[in-house]
Amino acid sequence: MARLTLEDFKISTSFPVHWGDMDAAQHVNNLVYLKWTETARLFYFEEMGMDVSFKGGEAGPILAWQDCKYTFPVTYPDTVHVGIRTVQILEDRFMMECGVFSERHNRMVALAKQMIVPYDFEALQKVSMPEAWLAAIRRIEGMA
């Protein structure tokens, strides 16, 4: 399998690495990566036209599961670029993938995956995938 590059992702954003992002091990703390991917997810959802108010009305996204594989330590100073894409669509959820890339080291430093479930925040239950979400994902990802 070919190595992923930032160009493999349709949506991306960048973050400066702050001194305070590092922990006692002298590299960026693992939770910081999850904050970066959370923000990238929100940008993707906004590109989809998704309701991210987390209130009643339209279905909204809920994070059902996530993992992150850390492949190279990031330290201050650096800038990371986070690419995000949808890699799988199921009947009632979709899987996203985030690549985190270090500008300083010119390489991928982490790969995170998230399972997103459409959720009715008023009824407090998951719902079927909205057709608008499916259409938006297909548009963003260039899927037929």
Image (spheres, rainbow, N blue to C red):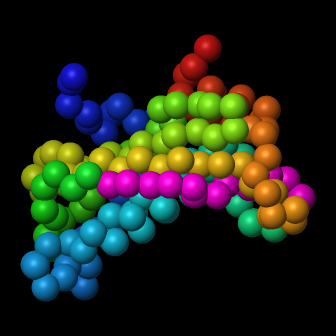
Where does residue 117 sit, x and y in percent of width and height? Answer: 65, 49
The magenta stretch is: 57-68
Residue 96 drawn above or below residue 88: below
Where does residue 85 sit, x and y in percent of width and height? Answer: 47, 38
Residue 137 drawn above or below residue 55: above
**In the picture provided, is 1 more to the left or to the right than 9?**
left
Q: In which quarter of the image is residue 26?
A: bottom left
Q: Does the magenta stretch include residue 56?
A: no
Residue depicted at x 49% and y 42%: 96
Q: Quadrant of residue 35?
A: bottom left
The answer to whether one can see residue 139 in this image is: yes
Residue projecting furthest to the front: 125
Where does residue 44 sit, x and y in percent of width and height? Answer: 56, 48
**In the picture provided, is 116 more to the left or to the right than 74?**
right
Query: How many marks overall?
Result: 0
Q: Quadrant of residue 28?
A: bottom left
Residue depicted at x 42% and y 43%: 97
Give the quarter of the figure containing the N terminus: top left
**In the picture provided, is 61 more to the left or to the right than 95?**
right
Residue 124 drawn above or below residue 138: below
Give the quarter of the figure containing the C terminus: top right
Residue projecting furthest to the top: 144
Magenta stretch, overall SS: strand
Where does residue 20 sit, x and y in percent of width and height? Answer: 25, 85
Residue depicted at x 35% and y 31%: 8
Residue depicted at x 13% and y 85%: 24
The answer to whether one can see residue 100 in this image is: no
